[in-house]
Structure formats: C-alpha cells, structure tokens
Amino acid sequence: MLDFLVKRLVTIVPTLVLVSMLVFGLQQLLPGDPAMMLAGEEQDPTVIAYLHKKLHLDEPLPMRYAWWVGGVLRGDLGDSVRTQQPVLELVAQKLPVTVELAALAMAIALVIGIPGGIVSAVGRGTAWDYAANVFALWGLSTPNFWLGILMILLFSVQLGWLPASGYVSPFEDPRANLAAMIMPAFVLGNAIAAVLMRHTRSAMLQVLSADYVRTARAKGLREPAVVLKHALRNALVPIITLGALELGTLLSGAVLTEQVFTIPGFGKLIVDSVFNRDYSVVQGVVLVTATAYIALNLLADLAYFAVNPRLRR
C-alpha cells in the first residue's frame, strides 16, 4: 500500500503542473484586457501602461506563467482585478459554503442511492425493483433548476416552511443554516442518488451471482449478512469511484443550483468572475477545483484498500 501511495503521489506532481499550464494558457485566450477594465471609462494610456507593468501583462507569456506559478507556490493566487481582494481570501470565504452544500448533498445521495440500489438488486424483478428504477429515471431526467424552482414554490411560497433563498452561517444560527441549505442539498443529492442507485444495483447484481456468495449461502449464513458483509463490500469499489467523482463535481460549484437558491459558493463566484473578466479569480478557483479532484481521486484509491482486502496483497 505504501508503494502504491508513493507512486500515486509521484504522478500527482506532473498532473498538477499540466493542469496549471492549461488553466493559465486557456485563460489567456479569453477576450478583454484587465488593465483597460481597471483604467475606467477614460482609459488613460499612462494608467493602462502602469497597470500592464504592475500585473506583468507587458511580459512574454512564459514569464507571466512563471510569475503566477511562483505566487501559487508561496500561497499567493493573486488579487481580484475588480475588487483588489486576494483570491485566496475569496476562496477561503466561498469554499466552506460549497463544502457544506456538497457534504449535505452527498449525504442525502448516499442515504437514498445505496440502500435503493441494494433493495433493487436483491429484489430483482419485484415491485421494489421497478419502483427504484422509476425513481432513478426521474432523478436522472429532472433538471436541477426546475426541481429547485418547484421546491421553492411548494415549501417556501405555498407552505412557508423554508426560506426561498439566501445563506446563514452555521456558526451564527445552525437551525437557520440547515433550513436554508436543505432544499439545494436535496436538489443536488437527488440527481446523484439516482446515479448511485443505478451503479449500486449493477454492481450488486454482478456480485450476488459470484461463487463466494453462493458458498456463503450454502454455509447457512443469514441473508442480511450475505448481502451486507460479503456482497456489498465487494461491490463498493465502483461506487467509491463514482462517489469521489460526483463529490468533486459538487466541490467545483453547482452553478445553476447556487444561482436558483442564491447560495454564495464556488459556482456563483466563478460565474461572476467569468462575466467580469476577473482572470485571477477564475485561475485560482479552477486550480483549487482541479486540486480537489486529484485529492479526492487519491482518497478513493486509498479507500479501495479499506473495503477490499484482496487489493492489499
């Protein structure tokens, strides 16, 4: 396991370098000059020249990349072009919001998706199996923004149980925070639960027909022990992979859902930054998101060893 971990860490370094080059290079293809935007309506040539020098925009592209990477290695992602606020500070403000939303959505997805997949696989061909498949198709085909609007109309406008939008820090009011986050978390978790259910069902059907499962039943083990201890544990590997990818997607920012519920997370931050041509913020957010994807995949690889003893050998 240690050798595997070392090899994975070695491959992460060139991956991050390539990601940083793509993030920086593709960002330069966007139209617009940050210096001209900062110079205001008058666009004084002296001010524009000063800003070009300050932001290193008058230097060749490799030198600008070197300046940016050097700042990243020191923990400096640059400053926002529009607000002059450090990008790292913006990330520190928005990331906890998105992490909380992603954690709640993933918890909802796991609670619904995995048990639903197990019930569907064990009861293949029964009414439970058809009901689970109908739920999965509904979750996969329902747009998040449409479901979010319907939930706002029902639970906020008609019933008045939950706030329609906004965000409250859990440190200020945990109850108000949960009330504000439960609807967007369910909207996101609903779609992921459908995907998890389908993959869990497929993996469980494959494992339940394996020889060691038939042997466990032949030994007289009770069905819950056969399903949960022997079958589910061996079916978790593809589910862990899918869960890590879906969690990475949530951490990158659920743009439409955050816009519908006015959640000040990563999704809203990156959309506003793209529209405002705030290059430093876009680069910083995309780099943090890519790093989170890589870290989650590494954690998923380590989780394989925990659930499948055969991989340890």
Image (tube, rainbow, N blue to C red):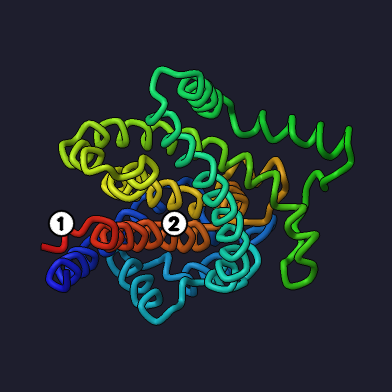
Q: Amino acid at mark 2?
A: Val
Q: Position of residue 112 (x, y in %)?
A: 54, 40
Residue at x-position 43% and y-position 38%: 196
**Which residue is nearer to you in this view: 290 or 28?**
290
Residue at x-position 35% and y-position 42%: 227
**Which residue is nearer to you in this view: 288 or 309?**
309
Is 96 situated above or below 293?
A: below
The quarter of the picture where the C terminus appears is: bottom left
Q: Position of residue 261 (x, y in %)?
A: 72, 45
Question: Does the rendering let one see residue 219?
Answer: yes
Q: Where is mark 1, residue-wise?
A: 310
Question: Does the rendering let one see residue 273?
Answer: no
- Dot placed on the residue nearer the N-terminal end, 2 or 1: 2
Query: Distance of mark 2 from mark 1, alpha carbons?
Result: 36 Å
Q: Identify the element where label 2 is drawn.
A: helix
122 left or right, relative to 146: left
Can you tell which quarter of the image residue 183 is in? top right
Please tell me how crowded label 2 is: few (under 14), some (14-19), or many (20+) other residues with Cα within 10 Å: some
Q: Where is mark 2, residue-wise?
A: 286
**Which residue is nearer to you in this view: 272 or 208?**
208
282 left or right, relative to 100: left
Residue furthest bottom in the image: 74
Q: Amino acid at mark 1?
A: Arg
